[in-house]
Every structure is written in C-alpha cells, then in structure tokens.
Image (cartoon, rainbow, N blue to C red):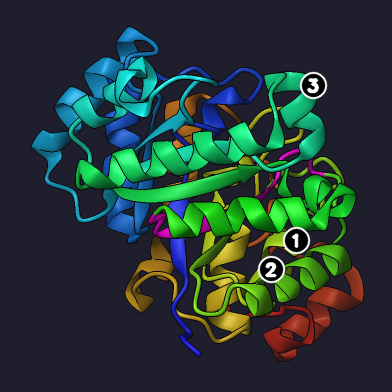
Amino acid sequence: MSKSISIFDTTLRDGTQGEGISLSADDKLKIAKKLDDLGVHYIEGGIPGSNNKDIEFFKRVKELHLNAKITAFGSTRRKNSLAENDDNLKRMIDAGVPAATLVGKSWDFHVHTALQTTLEENLAMIGDSISYLKRQGLEVIFDAEHFFDGYKNNPEYAAAVLSKAREAGADWLVMCDTNGGTLPYEIHEIVTALNQQLPGANLGIHTHNDCELAVANALSAIGAGARQVQGTINGYGERCGNANLCSIIPTLQIKMGYHCIPGDSLSQLTNTARYISEVANVNLPVNQPYVGNAAFAHKGGIHVSAIMRDSRTYEHIAP
C-alpha cells in the first residue's frame, strides 16, 4: 500500500467561495507561487472563462513554471448534447492546463431534481465528458458531487457513477461530502466499501466543514484507502469552509506516517498560512491548530511549570 498522499489545493477556486474572500488575478498568482513552494501536487486555479480574473490567471500562471499541476474546474456536458459542442468543456481545454477537475452528480435525487434528467443520461454525461477531455490529453480528476448523500440514498447508483468515470478514463475518483453533513465513521465505512468495489482505483476525498468534521472526515477517508485529499489553506470555503490543509498535512505526515509534501517544507506551513491570510485580507484565527499564534502558547499555572521542565507534558508535537 502506497504511503504517499496527493495534496490537491482548491484555495483559489473553492476557497474563494468563502464569505469576505475576494482575490485579484495578482493575488491568485502570488498564492499559487506560495503553494508551489510548499510542495502541493495540484493547484485548482478556478473556472476558465467564468470571469476576467480567472481568464487572466490561466494566461499568466504558465509564466511561473510551477512544479504543481494547475487544474481547471468545470462540470460535465449539458444533458442531451455532445461533449465536443460544450462551451464549458472547450474552455477547460483552451485554458492550456495539464489537468481538469470535472464535477458530476452522484446522488439520484440531484439527477432528477437539479438536472431534471434520467439516471442513464447522467451516466452518459459523465462518460462522454471524461473521455472527451482524455482524448485532448488532459489528466482528469472526477469530483463526484454529494457522493456520500447519494451513496446513503442509493449505493448502487453512486458506485455506478464512479465505475462509469473510471471506465471513461478518469485518473482520480474523488468522493465529495458537498453538504458537509457526513460523520467520520460513515466516511470510513463507505470509502472502505468503494475501495473493495473498485480495486486499484485512485480514490480521493473532498470534505466540507458544516459539522466541524471536514479534517476528521478527510483523515477517515485516507485511513480507509483514499489517496488524494482536497482542501484549502486555513479551511477557506463557502458556508463553514472546506477541509483545512494546514491541519491535514501535518497530521498525515507527523502522526499517521504518510508522505504529503517534502519534509523540509513542513516548517514553511505556518508562514504559508499567514502569507495567504494576509493576501486574502482575512485574520488568521489565533487558536488555529499547528499554525495559529496560540497553537503552542501556554497561559499561567501548572501548565507553564510543567512545560518549563519538559515541553512534552502539554505539547502534542515539537513546535
């Protein structure tokens, strides 16, 4: 079993959905450079063609010659149409990136209610879109939206969605807890089941923090066999935020024995978190684990006297 975990950063796309976060193209380029220095594997830049900032970002990011793969985000083709005629898919190709993140429905309720189409047509939309992007030479990360809700409602269909994506050539199958309402034990059970149903598949996890469990859920999925984790720096994201990579990376690397980023980059994590919070103009919570100012601060009394003797008495890692 591989002990390497692929880190997929979506601060520049999902993170910008957060309340009060607005990044210019220059801001996005600065953050991309900082993320690349940290050693993440994928940087999701945004939705090509959706606005001038993203158009400019995809144009200029090539000049930075980053090691990380820049990815463009978009959804599957429209119902009852052809992938090669889909403007959204064309824009992803025109962005000139090596990888594309394609989001598709995996909850039957969403297929009927939001897309207003059949379960078969949704599978066709997923298969056509992925194989079209693969024919254009892109690496494809398939994000199965509302996957855990879908699996709880109709496990056969949710699994069929991932099977279809894999069959069409998707390089990663990412299970998304889009509503952020799934619990760690449920994530573990479901990812374990999928790992057995799709042996050898590259599974990923994308969690939201609506129950304050995004980090726990991501770690649970990794423990059950997922090999890519999607998240944002400082947990930025819509509603209650995305999984916080500033907590996930050190926990995976220091406590769980996985390799995420180069070992010497781990000491840059606090600097990265603070830099990005400054560029985004958002205060870094003082009590944020690992990177907050108070993460290893101690106030008064027995804690301090014990720490003076040996810091291991109240610190879970060496700061």
Instruction: State yes or no: residue 294 in magenta.
Output: no
The residue that label 2 is drawn on is: 221
Q: Is residue 41 above or below residue 284?
A: below
Q: Nearer the viewer, residue 160 or 174?
A: 160
Q: Is residue 41 above or below residue 185?
A: above
| Range drawn in magenta | 169-180
Q: What residue do we see at 52% from left, 38% from top?
A: 124
Q: Secondary structure at mark 2?
A: helix
Locate residue 209: give its quadrant. top right
Q: Nearer the viewer, residue 256 or 119?
A: 119
Looking at the rendered structure, the kind of residue marked 1 is Asn
Looking at the rendered structure, the kind of residue marked 2 is Ala
Looking at the rendered structure, the kind of residue marked 3 is Thr
Q: Is residue 127 above or below residue 5?
A: above
Considering only order in the chain, which callout, 3 or 1, is on the residue closer to the N terminus? 3
Q: Secondary structure at mark 1?
A: helix
The residue that label 3 is drawn on is: 113
Q: What residue do we see at 77% from left, 26% from top?
A: 112
Q: Nearer the viewer, mark 2 or mark 3?
A: 3
Question: Does the CB distance between marks 1 and 2 fall below 8 Å?
Answer: yes
Locate residue 55: give its quadrant. top left
Q: Nearer the viewer, mark 1 or mark 3?
A: 3
The residue that label 1 is drawn on is: 217
